[in-house]
Amino acid sequence: MEEFIQCLSAFVGCFGFTFIFRIHKNMKFAFVGSLIGTLGWVIYLATRFLDNIFLQSFIAMLCVALLAEMMARIYKAPATIFIIIGCFPLVPGSGIYYTMLYAVQGMNDLFMESFLSTLGIGISLALAILISSTTLQVYKRIKNKDYATVE
């Protein structure tokens, strides 16, 4: 039941986030992006057995980014719309908060631990987006036989 509430909260959070970026004007994009974010959170929860928050974040964001790229092609819209909405549940907001709290309070050991963890998660998310985007661009070039020629 707790996982269901988390997934429902992920959907509501993603959908609410669409209002900040004014994506709610196109309800189809807002709904699909929110579903992508929810699926990302489901994958994050499903990979808990790995017991590695960085790997969990990477796998979930890789799925979110690939789904976002697919939906961008289906709906003929920028993939950024779906990626931004979809990554919302995976962004380490509490890690950022506690990192700043520990920094302000002068708790250096806790600050460094929180900072490195938050940085690692952020790098995992960025790397997943980079890999999915690059892979699809390479696939598109191979499919269209648009090879770079060396002269």
Image (cartoon, rainbow, N blue to C red):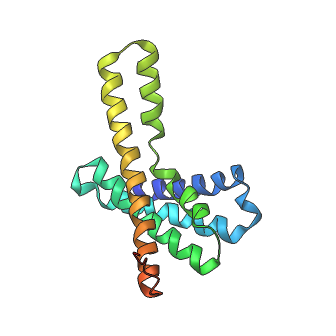
Image quadrant in which the C terminus is located: bottom left
Q: Is residue 42 above or below residue 111?
A: below
Picture coordinates of residue 95 (x, y %)? 42, 35
To which quarter of the image does residue 135 belong?
A: bottom left
Q: Is residue 67 above or below residue 91?
A: below
To which quarter of the image does residue 128 belong?
A: bottom left
To which quarter of the image does residue 78 belong?
A: bottom right
| 139 or 44: nearer the viewer | 139
Residue ranking furthest to the front: 151
Picture coordinates of residue 19 (x, y %)? 71, 53
Residue ranking furthest to the right: 25
Residue name at image x 31 percent, y 55 percent? 56
Picture coordinates of residue 33 (x, y %)? 58, 65
Residue name at image x 41 percent, y 20 percent? 102
Picture coordinates of residue 120 (x, y %)? 34, 42
Residue name at image x 30 percent, y 28 percent? 113
| 73 or 87: nearer the viewer | 73
Residue ranking furthest to the top: 106
- Count of number-bearing discs: 0
Image quadrant in which the N terminus is located: bottom left
